[in-house]
Image (cartoon, rainbow, N blue to C red):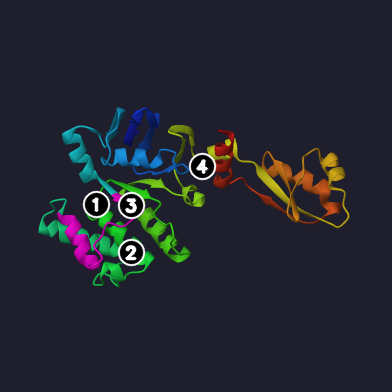
Amino acid sequence: MTYAIEVNHLKKQYGTFEAVKGINFRVKEGSLFAFLGSNGAGKSTTIEILCTLLEKTSGAVMIQGHELGTMSGNAAIRHLIGIVFQQSLLDKELTVKENILHRGRFYQLKKVQLQENYEFVLEYLNLNDIEHKKYGQLSGGQRRRADIARAIIHKPTILFLDEPTTGLDPHTRKFVWETIERLRKEIGMTIFLTTHYMEEATNADQIVIIKKGEIVAQGTPNELKEKFASDQIVLSFKKDIDVEYVAGQIGYEITQFGDVHKVNIPSTLHAIPIIEQMKPFLTSFEVVKGSLDHVFIQINEER
């Protein structure tokens, strides 16, 4: 198995404060890797180190076989990665095309190669309708398309996405994710994602959750849901039903939330006999699988 990124005992200190406390993880080539954490967890610090924007205090990092922290390693890494920041870096007075070609020249691409790459991003990001518009005149969704195009103009092997769909409408979010999936599946680009939308991490090959500079959980989405999230039955009872009596009959605790009640169960299959027992008392029910939202909340509460 080949890894695009290997992180071993990575630390970052500011004086006596440890922002990152000796973390370890690996990212498979061509995978979608989700790096999650609440504000102040050490997530942004880690990403800035991996992107050569911040020096590490100690530890070893290899990116596509290049050692982070050396002059030659950092130079090679910068040509291998693309970054979509939360805040744009493009010039508002230049057109989309001018911005992207200008950024492409930073990578010392020859004129023919730069034009080929521009045609590549033009097609992938569907920029035909905005390429001659000034960046400052674009909507939020149009800007995000241009931002991604800027990040991949040199065809990186690893793309870092720092909350790429925050503030976007559902249609634009869908387009962004369709584009990311195409990049991953068609050209094998490795995607390193941070997001506050847990559903965007559902399709990740691997998830790492960091809190207070430490990794507190990692695994596939299903592994994390099985370990940290409970499936639930959401219940609506008939009027005048003694809920405590029903709970005693089924042997599960029933908790009220507003005008509905919930029962945590080990798996959705456990819902079948419980519903059969409670059928005479119910007006409706819904079986809900544990989600990554539940995982994230549970981990943060436990720790």
Asked if the residue under mark 4 is in contact with the one under mark 1, i.e. CB atoms within 8 Å, the reply is no
CA gap between label 1 and label 4 equals: 28 Å
Which region shows up in magenta? 83-105
Q: In the rendered view, does 292 fall on the left or right side of 53?
A: right
**Mark 3 Cα shell of 10 Å, populated few (<14), some (14-19), many (≥20):** some
Q: Which residue is mark 2?
A: 143
CA gap between label 3 and label 1 equals: 17 Å
Q: Residue furthest front?
A: 15
Q: Which residue is mark 3?
A: 85
The dot on residue 164 is none
Q: Depth check: 91 or 161 in front?
A: 91
At label 3, which amino acid type do we have? Phe
Q: Secondary structure at mark 3?
A: loop
Which x, y percent locates residue 117? 20, 58
Q: Which residue is mark 4?
A: 221
Q: In the rendered view, does 227 fall on the left or right side of 167?
A: right
CA gap between label 2 and label 3 equals: 12 Å
The vertical placement of 246 against 100, above or below, is above
| Residue 204, quarter of picture | top left
Sequence-first tag of 1 and 4 = 1
Residue drawn at x 40%, y 51% is 163
Label 4 or label 3, whichever lies nearer to me, is: 3
Q: Depth check: 251 or 45 in front?
A: 45
**Is residue 94 one of those drawn in magenta?**
yes
Sequence-first tag of 2 and 3 = 3
| Residue 3, quarter of picture | top left
The dot on residue 155 is 1
CA gap between label 1 and label 2 equals: 19 Å
